[in-house]
Amino acid sequence: MTGAAGAQTLTTLTGNELIVVDNGGAVITQAAASTMAGLVGATRQSILNTNTIAVAGTLTAANITGASDFVALSLTGNPAGSAAITLPTVAATVAALPNPLAGQSYVLRVINTGNSGTWTVTTNTGWTLTGTMTVATATWRDFNLALTTTSAAVLTNVGAGTI
């Protein structure tokens, strides 16, 4: 992890202990990994989350956050026909981000790994959706998730593919 004031390094020591050092090698923080969960999330560049939902429902903020650059969400449930997955509110999403800033963005890939049904991403408080929001069986769709402010976000379709 690097900061504007100087480089910082996150290092795993033994087992479940973490240490953060500055660019001169001085220890800034040392603690059990469980007490530094926000810091660990801030340094992860990509993550794969899973949701077993099989009927229409609302995603959690944890489903669509957890990394700074690329978040993949694998939907493993099998809806009968088409079903909607509602985004969490922008407020909940922002609360799940370690250091939310207006203007930040990352790629959210929604993957339909179930063997039946099409998912449709639907809006919630604070969101603007742009482009195609459906994810058919055995396909994925990439979205750019961008915070316009810390209370509003845009989810934009940027591409799709097959599994």
Image (cartoon, grey):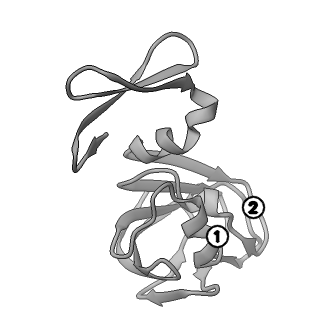
Image location (x, y in percent) of residue 134: 53, 79
Determine the residue positioned at 65% across, 58% down: 115
For the residue carrying disc 2, how many other residues have a C-alpha within 10 Å: few (<14), some (14-19), or many (20+)? Answer: some
Q: Which residue occupies the foreground of this view, 42 or 64?
A: 42
Q: Which residue occupies the foreground of this view, 63 or 120?
A: 63
Determine the residue positioned at 54% across, 71% down: 136
**Residue topped by disc 2:** 53
Image location (x, y in percent) of residue 152: 49, 84
Determine the residue positioned at 39% across, 54% down: 70
The type of residue carrying mark 1 is: Ala
Determine the residue positioned at 72% across, 72% down: 58
Q: Does 71 appear above or below 92?
A: above
Disc 2/disc 1 C-alpha distance (Å)? 19 Å
* Among the two numbered marks 2 and 1 on one chain, the one whose residue lies closer to the N terminus: 2
Q: Does 52 appear above or below 93?
A: above
Image location (x, y in percent) of residue 18: 49, 23
